[in-house]
Image (cartoon, rainbow, N blue to C red):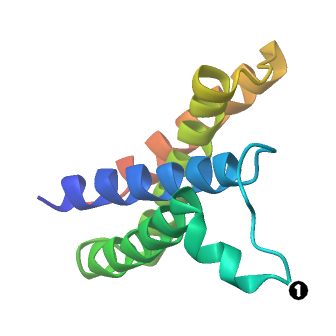
Amino acid sequence: MKWLVLLLGIAANASASLLIKLAQLPSRQAPLINHPWLLFLNWQLILGIALYCIAFALYAIALKYFPLNVAHPMLTAGAIASVAILSVVVLDESFTTTMLVGLGFMAVGIILLTAGHH
């Protein structure tokens, strides 16, 4: 169950980032300081904000089951990796070999962090 909380937190965080990016595309109406009501017309932005709130709640729950030095890096690295992959698949952004190596190093780091957790 505790691992599911972490995975859902990662998914909520990464989905929120993707939705907020989609909300900023030229075809959407991003809220402006002089037109704040546009916020209510952009469902992707609203859903992204809601998912960040859910991700925060799941993070708080995860801290009941994991030490901070495991939960935070796992959630952060998982979200970073997920966003990197989603940005390529959904937004057609570039992905380089260097980025792949960086994700590999993150994965090794997370494995080492969790291996020391009992």
State the image coordinates of residue 62 (x, y, percent, origin top left): 30, 72
Q: 38 and 21: which one is in front? A: 38
State the image coordinates of residue 21 (x, y, percent, origin top left): 69, 50
Task: Name the residue furthest top.
Answer: 97
> How many numbered marks does the figure carry?
1
Write down the quadrant of residue 30 in the picture. bottom right
Task: Name the residue furthest right.
Answer: 34
Q: 108 and 62: which one is in front? A: 62
Mark 1 Cα within 10 Å, few/some/many (few <14, many 20+)? few
Q: Is residue 39 left or right of residue 36?
A: left
Write down the quadrant of residue 41 in the picture. bottom right
State the image coordinates of residue 111 (x, y, percent, origin top left): 45, 40
Task: Name the residue furthest left.
Answer: 1
The kind of secondary structure element at disc 1 is: loop
Q: Tell me which residue sits at (77%, 26%) in the image.
A: 99
Is 52 located above or below residue 89 in the figure? Answer: below
Q: Tell me which residue sits at (83%, 76%) in the image.
A: 32
Quadrant placement of the C terminus: bottom left
State the image coordinates of residue 92 (x, y, percent, origin top left): 71, 20
Q: 91 and 109: which one is in front? A: 91
Q: Tell me which residue sits at (20%, 53%) in the image.
A: 4
Is 6 located above or below residue 34 in the figure? Answer: above
Q: Tell me which residue sits at (50%, 47%) in the image.
A: 78
Is 68 located above or below residue 118 in the figure? Answer: below
Q: Amino acid at mark 1?
A: Asn
Q: Is residue 44 left or right of residue 91?
A: left
Q: Is residue 86 left or right of residue 25?
A: left
Quadrant placement of the N terminus: bottom left
Is 40 located above or below residue 117 in the figure? Answer: below
Circle 1 is placed at which residue position? 34
